[in-house]
Image: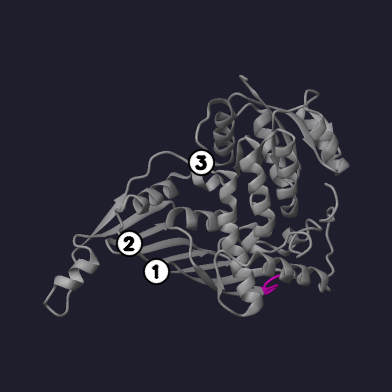
Amino acid sequence: MERVRIGIIGIGNMGTVHALYLKAGDVPNAELTAVCDINPERLKWAKENLGESVQLFDNADAFFASKAMDAVMIATPHYFHPPMAIQSLRQGYHTLIEKPAGVYTRQVREMNEVAEKSGRVFGIMYNQRTNPVYQKVRDLVKSGELGEIKRTIWIITNWYRSQSYYDSGGWRATWAGEGGGVLLNQDPHQLDLWQWMCGMPKRVRAFCAFGKYHNIEVEDDVTGYVEYENGATGLFVTSTGESPGTNRFEISADRGKLVIEDGKVTFWRLRVPERQFNAEYKGGFGEPECWKCEIPIWGKASEHRGITSNWVQAILKGTPLLAPGVEGINGLQISNAMHLSAWTDSWVDIPVDEELFYQKLQEKIKTSTFKKVAENRTFNIEGTF
């Protein structure tokens, strides 16, 4: 195989982005050959903008049966990611899913099991892993340059969304249609990066405000506290109701402190590790000598095109995936734990109790009295896309 023929299922906001850069030839050795959507208006758009060479489908079964592609990108609403990926993988297609991996870990674990047996290349659109800033931070942590982590703090409140955004689709900001709010829609990238750079926490205590700033039934403001196996702690603060917002990530460790903000990485590096200084220093007041270092960052984030290109090269040449699909469950573990902690007003261990989470989510769906007025289509999560 010299070129990968790609089909996209779901050509809403993100599916359209993927379709356009593929059609423009921005991904080497790849071509867009098919798209699928249940909305006639989206198929009309595809016909007008993607050309006659791209086959159009309004039914998922026909799309997968067509063999019009070698690989499939899944850009449907959240609940459909795992079942569509399972169908795609079982029918022999290399598969790339949009974030999040799914809504609940039980569903994602089943998807991962199919992927691992499939022999196909399975990726997830964690495009922020292409950002050299976060790659450098991961390197500093994993190499031991920072020493043992003591605390992580991520304030990510620059996800402002207006009411009209939530009103733009019947599935948005509902338990039945989206399965969550800011944690599941906006924050999967940060939750993934958090664990990718610093490791998984062992337990979570979170406080979620549901519809605090918007007429929605899911969370739009969250403060989560986590504990790690080594005794370190972490804080995650997020919202879609603050403007202007903040995106600041801080890691305190034995050898100093990292601050990531405005695309820069600043390292306050201790000449002597704090634990060593604490044990050896006899002068009473005093602290380790500290150097402020601006960490050089090279390159630019290749974003969605980068993840897609990496996936294509993994298919053609066996290049290691930057964002393996099976790792999508990690960030979801954290968001599921935060939801469950808020629902039960208690600490939640990781791995999360997936049966209890699923039970509580179904209760939210069944007891919902929220009436969604939307400008776009709605979805039945039990039906076929």
Instruction: Kindly state the secondary structure of the residue where label 2 is placed.
Output: loop
* Residue under numbered circle 2: 148
Tell me residue 20's x, y (percent): 69, 34
Tell me residue 361's x, y (percent): 73, 68
In this view, the residue in front, 12 or 188, is 188
* Residue 226 can be seen in this image: yes
The segment highlighted magenta reads 210-214
Tell me residue 240's x, y (percent): 62, 65
Determine the CA span between mark 1 and mark 3.
27 Å
* Residue under numbered circle 1: 232
Determine the CA span between mark 2 and mark 3.
25 Å
- Going from N to C along the chain, the mark reached first, 1 or 3, is 1
Q: Classify mark 1: residues with Cα within 10 Å, few (<14), some (14-19) or many (20+).
A: some
| Residue 50 magenta | no
* Residue type beneath disc 1: Ala
- Going from N to C along the chain, the mark reached first, 2 or 3, is 2
In the rendered structure, the answer to whether residue 127 lies left or right of residue 166 reads: left
Q: Taken as a whole, is the magenta stretch helix, strand or loop?
A: loop
* Residue type beneath disc 2: Glu
Q: Residue furthest top?
A: 2
In the figure, residue 378 lies in which quadrant? bottom right
Q: Residue at x 79, y 68 (%)?
A: 365
Q: Which mark is residue 381?
A: none
Q: Are marks 1 and 2 in contact (CB under 8 Å)?
A: yes
Q: Residue at x 18, y 69 (%)?
A: 277
- Going from N to C along the chain, the mark reached first, 1 or 2, is 2
